[in-house]
């Protein structure tokens, strides 16, 4: 059967458009022909390689790839040019801090590093909780550059790592598309992925994140897998395993690979496309890839324990069973084979049924969106929200409309590797629709299929000149038919051939139609390039650490409140001070301020985050008890009411309440923070629980005294367009320590408990004796004294004479 499929593939390749340089690169082909003709005249002056069309074609392909790399690298430098060379966002700050520790202390110290500045008082074992591929790659580049006596700071390596890898991604996409279709489509795909916003959003200069190198590893792994399936070579399969190992070390999205490749093999079995090439490729990939992936400390034994890896194991067992049945089919009778097959299928179905019941009962098997819906800490991340149609067009532009055409071309001319790209496209579309973050996995396949669509269109409308240059050889009978077009029967037993409708349609394509279609295609590509440049410049090149606003005259204001506040923390607080903030800012505080944080963006401990959320949503007294139990010294919040910054903590406050309610339902209830009408308001009509919680008081402390505009009253919040309801805010256990220039970052110091707490009521009066009036010395002399218990003499009455 393997030989039959091999012959079928060879026959299909002979008929499919896989000639290098055809298709979308018709300009490439014409230039090759012109250069070849010129080379014929100047054959003595040129070297032997460039006198052949293949030599010029290779040179032109290399030039296009180099220009694609250069365009991709340059378009990712807007942030560095407009602001400065700085690490962006939140997660990259931890990656940079870890890479700095790696280059300073060595690889083994990095694997055994216990970070005491994270998740106080728990800490974090960094080596066993990260994918080290990004840090090792940057550290290796830094080591090589210093070995060559090129002194470069590790920060600059981290800033420019993703733009450099974008060029490698373009090359790997070119190789993969060339294996799927032809070289012209590969060049177009490389140009597409170099500037497409869906990939630039995660690979701009300063975005030192795992996705910056993971997309290259993803595409290169797929290229080596397709090569392995086409050749059945163990050499290419081992290369695929090594690339998969690098992908596992770089990003958790390796799960997409370990599920897509088994799906490809399973569908090939269903389509009866089993061959020895598929057996050798997948068996080697699964065994070697499984062993290599378990060498990453963070992955460990997950490939043999978790449900997302079970599909690969099931397809591996199925492939072995299928190969065994193929072996027995030639050595057993038909009746014996049917009986054995029935028993094997029944046993396999029973094992699968029991496995599914076990995984469902133990809770290890669930729907993809379960965590996103029912776990607030996951649902609170903006990247985990469903993707809108606007996002598809914003990140992919015209490629959204053209990639279904490329998918249709692949399905129309199906073979083993095109089955893979069809499954890749369908699964990536589903996952990208579930979650905005997974738009990143859809972008490469969209670029490849759109390149195939453009390649086919250009080949159809610009490929007639090639047919004229090298007309097909015809036998004498066909020539006689052309000469005697009026005769139906020219020879005995031979009927004259009639032109098909497709050939008539191709003959009817005049130069005007070809020019119009070509111009329309070129206009679409020009619009795509303009859109990519505009989106990259305006949407994806602004670091979240530094903000910018524009005046009416076009001048720009730089809002550097974040670094101002972090620098204040670094210079004015104790080295071991503990800072409480929401988890979004944990990595930045640890990276820029070098201070201990309670929670950060790792979000591995939901109960600890819920405790911080409970402190933020409780009143000051209850929050003070929580802060005392966690040894908090400072509290940092983000407030955007002055400048209209919508990403502040008040807008995130309901997520704090929901996460805290999940762990402390008796103390925190989300309904208490809404009005009776179900509204979340910060004005006078707001909920009393909201107006007295710690987050509200820290955000709006002294804000009621500020009048931002003569048209608005004091205490007017520009972000929520409302006048705050509680302007008389006073603290008992906190005091304001720092407020940035534009009030974007506010830091409060937690007061230490007093040795003797003051009493809240009046002390009881114990002096019962009445107070005597004050008498001066002057009055004391005039006042007659008296003797206590003095005997009183009663005078008798004198008897009168009458009584006698």
Image (cartoon, helix red, strand yellow):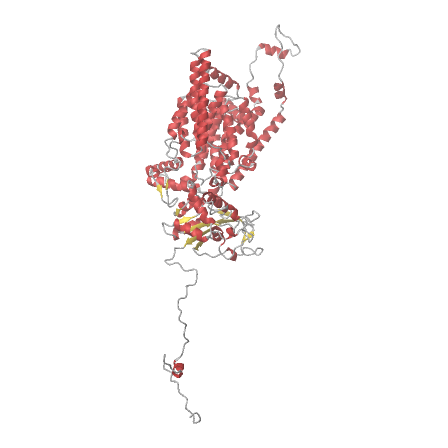
Q: Indicate whether 633 appears above or below 332.
A: below
Give coordinates of residue 688: x percent, y percent: 52, 52
Front one among 577 and 533: 577
Front one among 755 and 605: 755
Left or right of 704 on screen, residue 217: left
Q: Residue furthest front?
A: 804
Q: Is residue 796 in view? A: yes
Front one among 571 and 203: 571
Give coordinates of residue 660: x percent, y percent: 46, 45
Q: Residue furthest top?
A: 492
**Corner quadrant of residue 255:** top left
Q: Indicate whether 555 appears above or below 794.
A: above
Measuring 42% from the left and 17% from the top, which residue is drawn there? 324
Q: Residue furthest bottom?
A: 801
Q: Indicate whether 428 appears above or below 283.
A: below
Q: Is residue 600 in view? A: no
Q: How many marks?
A: 0
Give coordinates of residue 708: x percent, y percent: 54, 55
Figure quadrant of the C terminus = bottom left
Give coordinates of residue 295: x percent, y percent: 36, 31
């Amino acid at each position: 059967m393997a030989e039959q499929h091999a012959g079928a593939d060879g026959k299909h390749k002979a008929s499919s458009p896989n000639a290098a340089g055809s298709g979308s690169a018709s300009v490439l082909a014409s230039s090759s022909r012109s250069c070849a003709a010129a080379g014929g005249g100047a054959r003595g002056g040129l070297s032997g390689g460039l006198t052949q069309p293949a030599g010029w074609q290779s040179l032109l392909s290399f030039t296009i790839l180099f220009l694609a790399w250069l365009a991709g690298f340059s378009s990712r430098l807007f942030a560095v040019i407009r602001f400065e060379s700085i690490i962006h966002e939140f997660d990259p700050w931890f990656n940079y801090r870890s890479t700095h520790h790696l280059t300073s202390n060595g690889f083994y110290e990095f694997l055994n590093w216990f970070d005491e500045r994270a998740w106080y008082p728990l800490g974090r074992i960094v080596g066993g909780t990260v994918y080290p591929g990004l840090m090792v790659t940057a550290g290796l580049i830094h080591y090589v550059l210093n070995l060559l006596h090129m002194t470069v700071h590790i920060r600059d390596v981290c800033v420019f790592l993703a733009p450099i890898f974008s060029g490698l991604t373009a090359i790997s996409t070119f190789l993969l598309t060339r294996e799927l279709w032809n070289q012209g489509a590969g060049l177009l795909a490389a140009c597409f992925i170099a500037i497409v916003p869906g990939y630039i959003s995660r690979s701009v200069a300063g975005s030192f994140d795992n996705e910056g190198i993971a997309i290259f590893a993803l595409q290169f792994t797929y290229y080596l897998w397709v090569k392995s399936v086409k050749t059945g070579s163990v050499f290419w399969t081992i290369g695929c395993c090594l690339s998969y190992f690098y992908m596992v070390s770089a990003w958790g999205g390796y799960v997409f690979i370990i599920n897509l490749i088994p799906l490809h093999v399973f569908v090939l079995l269903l389509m009866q496309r089993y061959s020895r090439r598929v057996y050798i490729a997948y068996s080697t990939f699964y065994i070697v890839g499984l062993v290599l992936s378990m060498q990453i400390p963070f992955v460990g034994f997950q490939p043999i324990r978790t449900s997302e890896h079970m599909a690969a194991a099931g397809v591996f067992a199925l492939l072995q069973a299928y190969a065994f049945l193929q072996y027995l089919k030639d050595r057993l009778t038909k009746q014996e084979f049917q009986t054995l097959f029935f028993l094997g299928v029944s046993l396999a179905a029973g094992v699968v049924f029991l496995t599914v019941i076990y995984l469902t009962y133990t809770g290890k098997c669930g729907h993809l969106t379960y965590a996103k819906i029912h776990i607030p800490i996951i649902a609170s991340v903006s990247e985990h929200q469903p993707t809108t149609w606007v996002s598809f067009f914003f990140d992919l532009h015209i490629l959204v409309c053209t990639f279904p055409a490329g998918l249709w071309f692949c399905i129309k001319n199906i073979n083993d590797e095109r089955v893979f790209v069809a499954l890749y496209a369908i699964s990536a579309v589903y996952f990208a629709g579930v979650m905005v973050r997974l738009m990143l996995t859809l972008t490469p396949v969209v670029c490849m299929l759109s390149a195939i669509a453009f390649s086919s269109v250009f080949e159809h409308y610009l490929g007639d000149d090639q047919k004229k240059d090298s007309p097909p050889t015809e036998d004498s009978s066909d020539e006689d038919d052309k000469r005697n077009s009026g005769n139906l029967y020219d020879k005995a037993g031979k009927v004259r051939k009639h032109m098909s409708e497709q050939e008539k349609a191709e003959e009817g394509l005049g130069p005007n139609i070809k020019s119009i279609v070509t111009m329309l295609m070129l206009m679409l590509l020009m619009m795509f390039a303009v859109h990519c440049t505009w989106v990259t410049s305006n949407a994806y090149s602004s670091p979240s650490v530094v903000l910018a606003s524009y005046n009416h005259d076009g001048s720009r204001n730089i809002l550097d409140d974040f670094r101002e506040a972090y620098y204040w923390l670094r210079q004015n607080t104790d080295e071991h001070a503990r800072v409480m903030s929401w988890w979004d800012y944990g990595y930045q505080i640890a990276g820029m301020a070098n201070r201990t944080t309670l929670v950060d963006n790792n979000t591995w401990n939901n109960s600890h985050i819920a405790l911080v959320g409970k402190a933020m949503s409780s009143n000051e007294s209850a929050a003070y008890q929580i802060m005392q139990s966690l040894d908090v010294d400072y509290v940092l919040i983000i407030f955007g009411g002055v400048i209209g910054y919508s990403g502040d903590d008040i807008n995130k406050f309901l997520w704090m309440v929901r996460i805290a309610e999940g762990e402390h339902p008796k103390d925190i209830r989300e309904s208490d923070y809404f009005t009776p009408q179900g509204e979340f308001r910060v004005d006078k009509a707001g909920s009393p629980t909201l107006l007295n919680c710690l987050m509200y008081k820290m955000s709006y402390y002294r804000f009621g005294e500020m009048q931002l505009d003569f048209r608005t009253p004091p205490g007017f919040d520009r972000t929520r367009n409302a006048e705050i309801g509680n302007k008389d805010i006073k603290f008992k256990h906190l005091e304001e320590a720092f407020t940035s220039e534009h009030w974007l970052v506010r830091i409060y110091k937690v007061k230490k408990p007093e040795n003797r707490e003051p009493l809240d009521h009046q002390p009881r009066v114990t002096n019962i004796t009445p107070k005597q009036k004050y008498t001066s010395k002057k009055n004391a002399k005039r006042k007659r004294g008296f003797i206590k218990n003095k005997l009183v003499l009663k005078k008798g009455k004198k008897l009168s004479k009458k009584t006698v």
